[in-house]
Amino acid sequence: MSTETIDLKTRLITDFHARESVMNGEAGSAFHQKKRAALAQFDELGFPTIKNEEWKYSNVRDLISVSYNFNADSSIELADLEDLKIPVQDANIIYFVNGHYSPELSRIVSSSDQITIDSLANAYKKNPSLVNSFFNELTQDDNDAFTALNTAFTQDGIFVNVPDNQSVEHPIILRFVSDARTQNVGSQPRNIIAVGRNAQVKLAEAFRTLGNERSFTNSVTEIYVGEEANVEYYKVQNESENSYHVGTTQVRMLDRSHFYAGTVTLNGRFTRNNLNIIIDGERCEAHMYGLYFPDGTQHVDNHTVADHRKPNSESNELYKGILRDKAKGVFNGKIFVRPDAQKTNAFQSCKNIVLSTEATMNTKPQLEIFADDVKCSHGTTTGQIDEEALFYMRSRGISKPEALSLLMFAFCADVVSQIKIDSIREYLENVIADKLASK
Amino acid sequence: MQLVFQDVACDFLLRPKLVTFAVNYHELYIKYKLVMLSINELRASIEGKEILKGINLEVKPGEVHAIMGPNGSGKSTLASVLAGREEYEVTGGTVIYDGKDILEMAPEDRAAEGIFLAFQYPVEIPGVTTINFLKTAVNEIRKYRGENPLDAAQFLKMVREKAKLVSMNDSLLKRALNEGFSGGEKKRNEIFQMAVLEPKLAILDETDSGLDIDALRIVAEGVNTLRSPERATIVVTHYQRLLDYIVPDFVHVLYKGRIVKSGPKELAFELEEKGYDWIKAEVEAVG
Ligand SMILES: Nc1ncnc2c1ncn2[C@@H]1O[C@H](COP(=O)(O)OP(=O)(O)OP(=O)(O)O)[C@@H](O)[C@H]1O
Ligand SMILES: [Mg+2]
């Protein structure tokens, strides 16, 4: 372990104790005890190295080699965010700047007596026991240093509580902005989405970085999907050449619920997404879609888990990537089918186009099946652009760059079309078309 | 020099007999667009294996040339090389089209100059609709020619007319290009694209194979509608049947990378009747 590694870790632990010492009575709360336990876990685990099987292809040495200001103030205004915006109408738009809720920038339209959409800090102030009942309940077994670190430092994020039979009419768009215009900034948003029986919500997390200094985001989202609930969850990362992102989304689904996830990584220096779904109910449907476009020396790593614990459910996964230059991609998709989960259908596919000989893609499907009556399939492909198709298009007068961008856009289409918040899908179509055309 | 001019004036079609005059004739033919396509000693290989071993062919505006020959003789290779497929390495010879040396030209530029290849095996392209693909093609070609792009309404009107011409079902236009199309639908789509792009030189590589009798007639009618004194067609086929509909001016036999025999349309009947053995025998006897 290098001295720098010890530095960031030690600094974080010292910081934790300093904060704790000024907490007065709150330090004894159940909420804080969870954070404390998480800090101990982080201390024990330390930042992962590539010797850790889960981090074999994603080296965080660079990420932890500098220090970050986790309490950076920001003078950001809406005007600064103009070109970072996803144009959405009729939505709840909630800003977090450097990890802190910004009421001035936000607009919450769907909050009501029944439905809570609030910052985690506010929600905790209003109803500590409710928030605590959801906090770290899904992630406590995660055994991941970044998740533990986030838990230990939980301060703010979103808290959404949709009670039984309620439906949030407008999508909830969470905009996490790192203001790295003057210094290295760190943020650790913590989100809790609790969706009751037969309730519905659509939400999106959008990550952007402003400025050229480093940003480090370590986000954790816990999503409770009640019986017969329907939840759509999108994550759009369009960060800077100097942004580092580690994020975990932990989901638990109950009987007959549906969950859709779409993870699109447009830009960012280093990205690691963990999407873990526990299918703890019968007749559930879990869908996971992913798309990534690393170029330069960018690194994108998607780890997913579909953990089937009950019979008769289905999971369906499609990840696609286009890699250029010296980019590195990693896909690790785990499917667990527990002994009770008979008649499970689990499908997984990861397809990649590698446009340069120096770009690499590591794919690892990992199936652990302990039931005998199941249908599982998985497949990964990594290839170049189809030369036959390219020639066919060019022979009709379509220039090579245009043909390439049409082919690549078509390659992405079956993932993009799965994004059901229209404004986000349209935004992505435009950004992706630009991205594919500009090279 | 004077002699040359006189000769050209009195008989355009006269072939140069003296090698020294050949170049002059050649240039003049091209200059006055009396020859649209002139292939001279064309050689091409793939993966180090020579497939075309010195092809010579001249195509004049208004003509239809049929190219026949046994499997593997190089017909599709010739078609692909003309369309600009980069996997093939041209190792010798020239191809002058419309007065321009096209061998250095990108496939898209050749298309914009009016060359069209109907593929023996049309490629499936998931995620790109036929209509979108064609719109991009039409407007890219217009851009190359310095014309304004067609707007959506103009384009649709034109496409509808052309689709009718080859009885192309509207629903196919909205589907991903060739994806899941039947063999016949794919071939019909090739002719439909040809009708939309209105090429000067169309090369049809076995467009007839896989077509039922009705489709064959429709496709042939499509081709014939486009026939004009300014356009030329090269038809690669194994069957005399197609040539009943698209009547060729010349029939050539390609064998082992060379055109070993050329003749009038009757040659196709002879081939249908006797097969290729007699030609192979002739070639072996000479060679
Ligand atoms: N990509 C390639 N790699 C290796 N050999 C090739 C390739 N493409 C063509 N060939 C070879 O070149 C030769 C000519 O092929 P071509 O497709 O031009 O024949 P063809 O006359 O069109 O035959 P058919 O009547 O069967 O369509 C064949 O021997 C073929 O195997
Ligand atoms: Mg062929």
Image (cartoon, coloured by chain):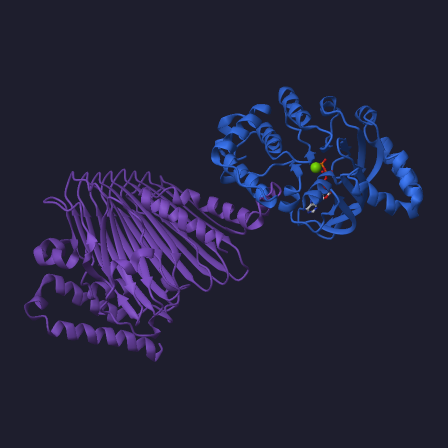
Q: Residue B68: where, in percent of width, then height?
A: 77, 32
Residue farthest top in this picture: B214
Q: Residue A374: where, in percent of width, then height?
A: 36, 40
Q: Is A407 located above or below residue B202 in the figure?
A: below
B125 to the left or right of B221: left
Q: Residue B200: where, in percent of width, then height?
A: 69, 36
Residue at (20% x, 58% y) in the render: A157
Q: Quadrant of the C terminus of chain B?
A: top right
Q: Quadrant of residue B36?
A: top right
Residue at (56% x, 40% y) in the render: B137
The chain letter corresponding to purple is: A
B53 to the left or right of A201: right
A427 to the left or right of B284: left
Residue farthest left in this picture: A25
Residue farthest bottom in this picture: A3
Q: Can I make out residue B112 in this image?
A: yes
Number of dots carrying numbers? 0
Check the rendered structure and report the hue given to chain B: blue
In this view of the protein, which residue sits in the foreground, B115 or A36? Answer: B115
Q: Quadrant of residue A168?
A: top left
Q: Quadrant of ligand 2?
A: top right
Q: Quadrant of residue B27?
A: top right
Q: Is A245 located above or below residue B116 in the figure?
A: below
Residue at (30% x, 71% y) in the render: A182
Q: Can I make out residue A142 in this image?
A: no
